[in-house]
Image (tube, rainbow, N blue to C red):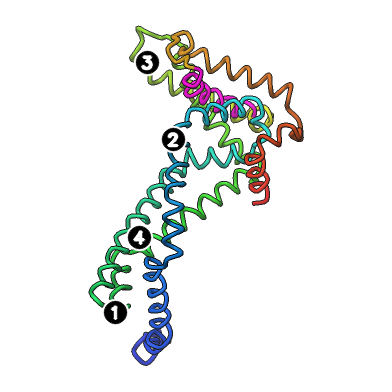
Amino acid sequence: MAPFRCNSRNKIPVAPLVDEVITPLASKGFEKITSLKINEKVENFRNEASPKLEKAKSMISGNTDWIFAVAGLVLLLLGTYFKNLLLCGQVMNLFLYSSLKTSFDELRAAILAAWGKVEKAEKDGDSTKKALKALSEEKCSDKVAAFAFQLFQAAAACHMVMHGGSFARAIIFAYALANGVSQILGELIDISGHDDVRPWFDKLLLLTLYVFFGSTALLLPSLALALNASLIGSQWVKDHGLKVAKLEGVEALKGPQLIPGLMLFGFLSFLILGGDNLSWYFKLPLLPAYFAECVLELL
């Protein structure tokens, strides 16, 4: 049997569809988009919202240390109640944040460049086809598809670690705990005079911690969750809480013993406050985090 070859008679003509349906729809959409700039209500809303948005940004940037210090303290005390937030946040931060941010920045730059060309096409009185051509030159569709893929990838990764079983969670716990604890032990252990074996020692220590925390996460998942939350909370308290308390100048608090001490405090709080359900007097002040945790539970 001769292979099928696509020639002009086999192709489906879509040029009439483009001329009669797609182009008029694109023209109407283009007119609506360009009319947003001169719409009085839109302009008034933007003028009123812009100062409030800038004020909110300045408030958040000015209180970053407070936000992270409080969040670190919450993780130390009640971190095990926010398992889904912790898992999803860690998998995003450890593996996906950089690619997602790069894809978003590329999409934003392409949209801004395309919008400039659209404005130029409007001023020059060009047709809608030329405006659409300007959009396609910036490869906006490719950037949108790439960013959408990154979002779906992030959603799939979060779903996998939240609902994919103990093994998926054990990988995240082992990776986070092994790398975090290895840095702490690297500062505590002194092998001066043997710098030639230091790289091998660090790799052997990291491998041992991987095996230990991986086994712990599989056999005692609640304990691994408590250690993971305590590690993150202690790091945030050390990096930001000391600034809030104005104790960053105290050299004794800068030593590597602070994080293990805070982790021990977090573990003890897990033994005392740990349970199956968060009490209502904790839910009220932590309502946004608790709501986000419930939403992630449904994914």
Q: Which residues are magenta?
A: 226-245
The circle on residue 127 is 1
Q: Is residue 89 visible?
A: yes
Query: Does 219 lie within the magenta span?
Result: no
Q: Marks 4/2: CA distance? A: 26 Å
Q: Is residue 212 visible?
A: no
- Mark 3 vs 2: CB contact within 8 A: no
- Asked if residue 260 lies left or right of residue 14, the reply is right
- Give the secondary structure at mark 4: helix
Q: Residue at x 49, y 18 (%)?
A: 242
Q: Residue at x 69, y 30 (%)?
A: 222
* Above-or-below relation of 193 to 151: above
Q: Residue at x 44, y 15 (%)?
A: 248
Question: Mark 1 or mark 3: which comes first in sequence?
Answer: 1
Q: Nearer the viewer, mark 4 or mark 2?
A: 2
- The residue under label 3 is 197
Percent x, y of residue 55 = 45, 42
Which quadrant would the N terminus be assigned to in this image? bottom left
Q: Marks 4/1: CA distance? A: 19 Å
- Mark 4 vs 3: CB contact within 8 A: no
Percent x, y of residue 213 = 59, 27
Q: Marks 4/3: CA distance? A: 52 Å
- Give the secondary structure at mark 3: helix
- Give the secondary structure at mark 2: helix
Question: Mark 3 or mark 2: which comes first in sequence?
Answer: 2
- The residue under label 2 is 61
* Above-or-below relation of 19 to 183: below
